[in-house]
Image: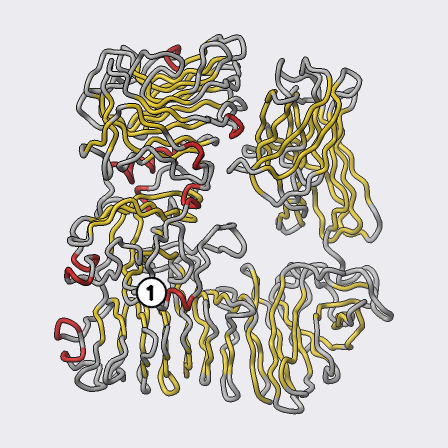
Amino acid sequence: MKTKYFLFFSILFIAVSDFTAQATCSYKYRKRITFNSSQVSGTTDLIDFPVIISITNDNNLRVTSSGGHVQSANGYDIIFTSSDGVTVLNHELTSYTSTNGSLDCWVKIPLLSVSIDTDIYMYYGNSAVTTDQSTTNTWSNGFVGVWHFDNDVNNSTALTWMNGTNYSTSNNATAKFGTARRFQSGSSQYIDVSPYNSAYNLFSDLTVSAWLRPSTIGIDQKIAGNEDNVNGGWKFGVYTDNKIEFEIRNSSNSPSLSRSASGGTPITNNTWHYIVGQYSDPGDFINTYLNGSLDRNYSTTASCWSSPGTMKIGREPFASTAFLDGRLDELRLSNVIRSAGWIATEYNNQNSPGPGTFYTISSEPKEWLGGSSTVWSTGGNWSGGSAPAASTDIIISSGTFDPILNANLQLNSVMIRSGATLSLSNRTLSIASDVMNCGVINGSTGNLVLNSTSSNIQVQNLSGSGTYNLNNLTINNTFSSPSVVLNNSVGVAGSLVLTSGIVYTSATNILALGTSATSSSGSSSSFVSGPMSKVGTTDFIFPIGKNNKWRRASVTSISASSTFRAEYFDTPYANSTTVNAPLNNVSKMEYWQVDRIVGAGNAKLALYWEDASASVINNCPDLTIARWNGASWDERAGTTVGGSSCSGTGSGNVLSNAVITAFSPFTFASKLGGVNPLPVELSNFSASCGDEGVEIKWTTQSESNNDFFKLQKSKDGLEWQNVKNIVGAGNSRSEKEYTFLDKVYSNEISYYSISQVDFDGTEKRYKLISVACGKKKDGKVTLFPNPVITELNFDLNSLAYNGECQIKIVDNLGRLCQEFEFYLNPENSAIKMPINLKSGYYFVQIFSGKTLVCSNRVIVQAEH
């Protein structure tokens, strides 16, 4: 069993419920759900992907009055968390049967890996929860409409005004999930969605999907659409040839439809089919999918016009014809183009939703009841009358007696409930998965070993709001790119042994070593990423690092018992230029935050490098230490310790000559120019349209070991091609300007990126830029750069409008985020709009009066 760790703090921006570790600790039971990576299609991980968890007849999930462990008769005390056991995931509970423990629930998975099995937890058994924990945020990833048809025609997204109005369709138990809607051809049975709001960009990028079980074939049947037969629009259905059809119409009502492409597979009656239709204006295509596979692809440069017509489900949108005859379930509209991998994964998950193929669900853990004694191996202390076998999941409840280990144990996971204590008693407890501690781990004389292997868990978590009093802690996770994440502070009184795996900590979840604690030095494959502390007067080397960089720091000759906290950063400090004599420069590669948080002890400080080239160090005699005084860098004179190497991949450390009396950021520094040089510092990178092509310029303030710059170009910002390698200056302290003329460019937006390559092959990529030159397609607005940081440019020459206009920027939920008014005429068709938005996807809409003229998608990215 494998899992992938979600690096919430550095990779994903995830909306979660306002739950804390204390909140999840109020739940009594949990099971692990593991998603099979072989069922996740495509080549890239899927972000914020809603999966269906469908469980039938689980005795543990019955309500307590029926012999189970769920407290709410409505299933409200069933929640889901990420693999850390703490971060609650958004979900929508659509059905629950309390008497037999059956449920259907949609859970938004922050990252569903294509290469490594993904774990989440299902928690249940909390009498304090009496309200539905479902949230519309389950469907916030580009979904505009989600209709489950479970006894209603309501939309499950936040856009409740897109709830349907039912016209004679009926609820039907023959469904893919729960219940479905039954439509009958010729019986004027349909669903009206009005007001259908076209402001949600359903005419630029659109994906429509549904489960269809036709009762009749060979007739024209419409599933959904808003085309009004005058002003354009879209519609989706099955044509008389029994093949999926997706159609758009432009402003003159001329159609473009998937039926124009060859191929396509006929569907059959009385069989469930997963059908998908797509239209992309930027991509110039119409796609249809059948049961997770591409069915037809039709290229078109036509635009889907924003029809004012209301959306109809189950009939021709503009006339009482082409009625659907059959059952419809799980209809969805998205204002994004779902990838082929996304669509195939939806089919895999929804076609076989029960446990076994797409996911597996663990058994309920063996529970310590503690009614007989403190002896772990006594069967009477455990549920079922027997002690747990090796490599199983367990729950420690607060009983008459708390458990004390009487032998070394290998377990899979441990959950300790509030009020319970687990004593290690000079034994070794090895954990292959995670620890959820809501009580106390008393390990003052024992050992806790985190030892996942290649067949277990990539990321192990120490979570919960309880107390971790450990003697020895060993990190020995041998999974590929292994790590251990602290979701609570962990105290170590004995030894910290770092063998394999990165330990991630934070300011609130710190690794704290006591007075007598010791630690191994760590390695490039095992160190602490984040802050850690050490108390006492004993010399100590902090085994810290960041992002695969192992960079230690030490405090020695400590004058009085104090608590020191240290953290390494592999980025330059906010100010790396203001230096005081005798310093010439400080590192623009890295720094260490070393603080004395308790006590008044002074100490000598040493900073370590493990790769002189990577730290840009080439002169040992000149190397010294700098301290940030709040306004500038002062020298804290240091000497390179004997045996250090300041060339190539050599390692070493520089030690302060005297004790440090004030603590703050520290870094490497140099007193001479031309040695221990600075890295390449790029101060400008721009592109503009010239008479002969795109003029690209960039400027460096300094360069170190710079072999060359690699210039690349892309049409979409995703697939890149090399343009040219431009020789760098090697080592330089003066400003250098570079230019390149790209004579081969298209009439559309072009993206450029630049990478700097060192002599040793180390490569660093800088931000991308975009430029639009030449003419654009008729009837389309050009906006650039895209992605945008601070200012968006509009070329509106193609718009046949004069007068007052508005630009509105909305998010995926249609919420207005920014607005800009201007007067459009031939002399004022180039508009600049300042952007002040968080990173993410947005839709830019241009209005003339109340008429929506056009809409485009734009990516806002943070400034680097």
- How busy is the neighbourhood of tag 1: few (under 14 within 10 Å), some, or many (20 plus)? few
Which residue in the protein does label 1 denote? 128
The residue closer to the viewer here, 312 or 477, is 312
Q: Quadrant of residue 465?
A: bottom left
In the rendered view of the protein, which quadrant contains the N terminus? bottom left
Residue 463 percent coordinates (x, y): 41, 68
Q: Secondary structure at mark 1?
A: loop
Residue pictured at 38% horizontal, 39% vertical? 156
All told, the count of numbered labels is 1
Q: Is residue 569 left or right of residue 741?
A: left
Up-down relation of residue 511 to residue 452 (above or below):
below
In the picture, measured across the screen, residue 204 lies left or right of residue 420, that is: right
What amino acid does circle 1 point to?
Answer: Ala
75 vs 830, nearest the viewer:
75
Position in image of residue 778 (x %, y %)? 63, 13
Residue at 37% x, 11% y: name it: 319
Q: Is residue 708 above or below residue 517?
A: above
Percent of width and height locating residue 547: 55, 59
